[in-house]
Image: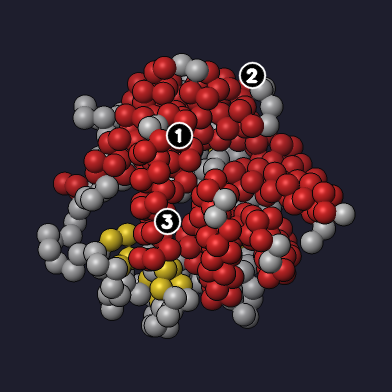
Amino acid sequence: MQPEKYIDQYRHALLNDVIPFWMKNSPDHESGGFFTCLDREGKVFDTDKFLWLQCRQVWCFAMLYNQVETRQEWLDTALSGADFLQKHGRDARGNWYFSLDSHGNPLMQPHSIFSDCFATMAFGQLYKATGKEEFKNIATGTFYNILKREENPKGIYSKAVPGARPLESFALPMILCNLVLEIESLLEPALVSEVIERGIDTVMNKFYKPELGVILENVSPDGSFSDSFEGRLVNPGHGLESMWFMMDLAERTSDELLAQRAVDIAIQLVEYGWDPVHGGIFYFMDVKGNPPQQLEWDQKLWWVHMETLITLLKGYLHTGDERCAYWFERVHAYTWSHFPDPEYGEWFGYLNRQGEPLLTLKGGKWKGCFHVPRGLFQCWKTLEAIQSKVSLNV
């Protein structure tokens, strides 16, 4: 691999395209927070505010301030979003809502524990940037609340009949593996170790099925396979994203075996999810090859490809596995020839199977200022680390 071929591309896209797009079009200067429903040109087409995306954008600008450059405009953007969240984001019990109207009035109950996850990330980064105790308290208090809800994340908002086909979802244990590293310095070391050990075991031994070569989205509480729509569901992008979380944990603990195992699983997943006809990675698949329940199963999504690029680069950095280099080149070529919008900036999010934009929006209910900038940053820095490693070995 020749990292110097790509470093400027990822850095330039982050700092001169994607971040300026969101800085220009997203802030709500009247009510606070961010507009995330932006059309191709960046014009607001809906003013509802979704907590996932509000928190993620606060995190993004605070992270850039902490790790790239102490630009005051980045910190001010993060602080503005945080102020809106502090005023409007939580119910009386401290749970974070799913959505608000433009003025901050709640629209949808706090049914999603991922609002809490992203709030933890946001205020953890802001504490690093400012040292303000109130941000630390919000981050840690929310994290402890997540752990309390871990066994029953949806609580009273669950639609399932109690006891009827109980299933555990991959999403929460996956994200906890990353979340605990985000706020590690704010937590007791024993708790950090416990969450990490449990997370690695859950991801690698419960949801990953070596006999199938995939990570399942849902399993029975004992880890067994459920032959149902939910139990057969594979989201290759989710599995691939989780593998760079595993690699970060492996780096933290100098666990070379875990790093190599994560690489092996990542290669299995990208080979499994790759569309052999049109290229790109499928959104959803049925592990038995049955028709998926999700009608959007064959779409090609921005975040799936961005997370895959991160995983492949980190895999190459940590192990030197040439399969990572091969697949990085392949996924990079597909991603950069389909998702970036050279006319109006930022990236398209949703392509059909043939790779044509289904929607030209740059942000909506699910796509915001997160996966693209985080991915560009991670790839840029990982490529620099690979370059340094190569230089040392010459």
Q: Residues within 10 Å of mark 3 (few under 14, many from 20)?
A: many
Q: Which residue is mark 3?
A: 200
Q: How is the image coloured?
A: secondary structure
Amino acid under label 1? Ile
| Residue 177 visible here | yes
Closer to the eye: label 1 or 3: 3
Foreground of the two, 229 or 27 = 229
For image coordinates 47% across by 60% down, the residue present is 238
Label 1 – label 3 distance at C-alpha: 17 Å
Residue 334: x and y, percent?
69, 65
Quadrant where the N terminus sits is: bottom right
Q: Secondary structure at mark 2?
A: helix
Q: Which residue is mark 1?
A: 183
Which of the numbered marks, if any, corresponds to residue 72?
A: 2
For image coordinates 47% across by 46% down, the residue present is 178
For image coordinates 43% across by 63% down, the residue present is 204
**Hey, which residue is sitting farthest bottom in the picture?**
289
Label 2 – label 3 distance at C-alpha: 37 Å
Foreground of the two, 197 or 169 = 197
243 left or right, relative to 186: right
State the count of labels: 3
| Residue 283 visible here | no
Res 27 quadrant in image = top right
Foreground of the two, 216 or 87 = 216
Residue 60: x and y, percent?
56, 35
Amino acid under label 3? Ile
Quadrant where the C terminus sits is: bottom right
> In the rendered image of this protein, does residue 205 appear above or below residue 67?
below
Amino acid under label 2? Gln
